[in-house]
Image (cartoon, coloured by chain):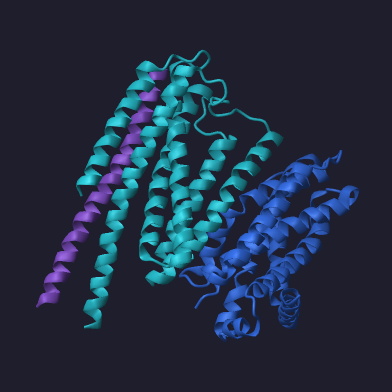
Amino acid sequence: MTKIDSVFWAYTLGWAVFFGFYLTLAKRSKDLRAEVERLKKAREK
Amino acid sequence: MALLSNAAVLLGKEVRTEFRSRELLSTTVVFVLVVLVVFSFTFDASTSDSRRFGPGLLWMAFLFAASLMLQPSFLREQSNDTLSALRLAVSDPFAIFLAKIGANTLFLLVTELLMLPVFATLFNVPLGARLPLLLLTFFLGSLGTSIVGTALAAISAQAKMRELLLPLLLLPVLTPVLAASTEVTVGLMAADPVVKWKGLGLLGLFDVVFLTALWLFGEYLLEE
Amino acid sequence: MGKRALLGAAAVALLVAAAYAAFFVAPTERTMGDLQRIFYFHASCAWAGLDAFAVCFIANLLYVWKRQGRYDWLGVSAAEVGLAFTTVVLITGPIWAKPAWGIYWTWDARLTSTFVLWLLYVCYLLLRTLVDESGRRALLSALFGIFAFIDVPIVFGAIRWWRTQHPAPVIMGGANSGLDPVMRKVFFFSVLATHVFMAFLIAERYALEKIRGEVEELREEAEAA
């Protein structure tokens, strides 16, 4: 593996970490928003 | 000064409580002894190797022992809710911390002083050359361990899994103490003893910084 | 919602531009060759991580002082984001080390200190999972966060001194000292990009924590009813 390949992998893996982090945020946001809706509906009953 | 006299009275109480049962001290001393013996299997203890690696494992043994011994600091108070009584008794909650730090440092020092000759004998490392500075190192290191340990014990006492949590929180925070103490001790136990003043300075700095932090934030640690 | 999306778009644009600069604008370093280009990413992430932890520290202080939930939310958000950046530092370090020295890890001062830093904030997050009541959780983690952050400079200083006692290979040498002017500009641009990205991630995580707080409130209401 050439030296420039290592740099490429460093950037890719780094961005993968950030992307993964962002994805977990998005998923949890979606789930929690659904939960808020559910709880609000239950409260209105 | 009211703070110091309060702290002194509470320190007396801590020491008397411990000496009534002596369970903490005896268990800690035996624990360090066990760790020393167990470690002896991990490397072939020639004198030169022992001079290089011995201090490290000695300090690790003390840190592990401390993280176990600091638990009762606050857990003892929880069983009879004596903490509220203590807080009512003193105007400055820092006195409570000073007393506990004093007691914990004392217990750690007693353990270390008992274990040092054992270590010297088992691993063939003569101690005589720079004994006063060695004792200073142990004092500064134990003080740092107690200051941070007491503060974190107050935190972990209010959380779940506290027996595992305290060592877990303690060890990363204490890495400067471990690094500095080990290095200074290695220097003092070398065939040609050398005093690493910068290391001692680091230990002193650590102690001052965290004692100040505890003085500023301690009362919140004791909140109901 | 719109503001965060805008910030996100800006952050991504800056990151891509910074990467381009690192690969094509920055000159090739004399001794390490192209491998040195990892430095722009590695070091700028390190700074962003530390600054995220600094934000956490300030949030912790504010919480202890004011006891308002939003400072707790900011604290945990900044801590998680800081941890993400620090993780990237710990991943890119070995990727540099292997071609450079043939080994993945060396207990070099900066890498060791970064590892301890990482552990400290993992403990911060772990502590939070072990306290059930939200007010107590906020207070205890804020206090631990304060102690942890105060410890950071001492950790870096002590480990750096410890390392001088046992000289060993240094990751990226004194890459900061003696940077060619173009390199310096590329580096500062990378730092800007990672900081904008850090701000974006903290904002996103904070928004999530805010919703979580809402859910907790609604649940408590439902239980009281």
Q: Is residue B120 above or below residue C225?
A: above
Q: Position of residue A2 (x, y in %)?
A: 40, 17
Residue in the image at 47% along x and 70% along y = B159
**Residue C68 vs residue B180, the one in the foreground:** C68
Residue situated furthest right in the rendering: B129
Q: Which chain appears cyan?
A: C
Whether residue A5 appears in this view of the structure is: no
Q: Position of residue B40 (x, y in %)?
A: 71, 51
What hue does chain A carry in this figure? purple
**Quadrant of the image for the N terminus of chain B?**
bottom right
B168 relative position to C162: left or right = left
Residue in the image at 41% along x and 23% along y = C186
Q: Position of residue B121 (x, y in %)?
A: 83, 54
Q: Hey, which quadrant is residue A11 in on the image?
A: top left
Q: Which chain appears blue?
A: B
Residue in the image at 48% along x and 65% along y = C65
**Residue C216 vs residue C106, the one in the foreground:** C216
**Residue B153 vs residue C11, the one in the foreground:** C11
Q: Position of residue B210 (x, y in %)?
A: 64, 58
**Residue C59 vs residue C166, the one in the foreground:** C59
Q: Hey, which quadrant is residue B46 in on the image?
A: top right
Whether residue B11 appears in this view of the structure is: yes
Q: Is residue A36 above or below residue C16?
A: below
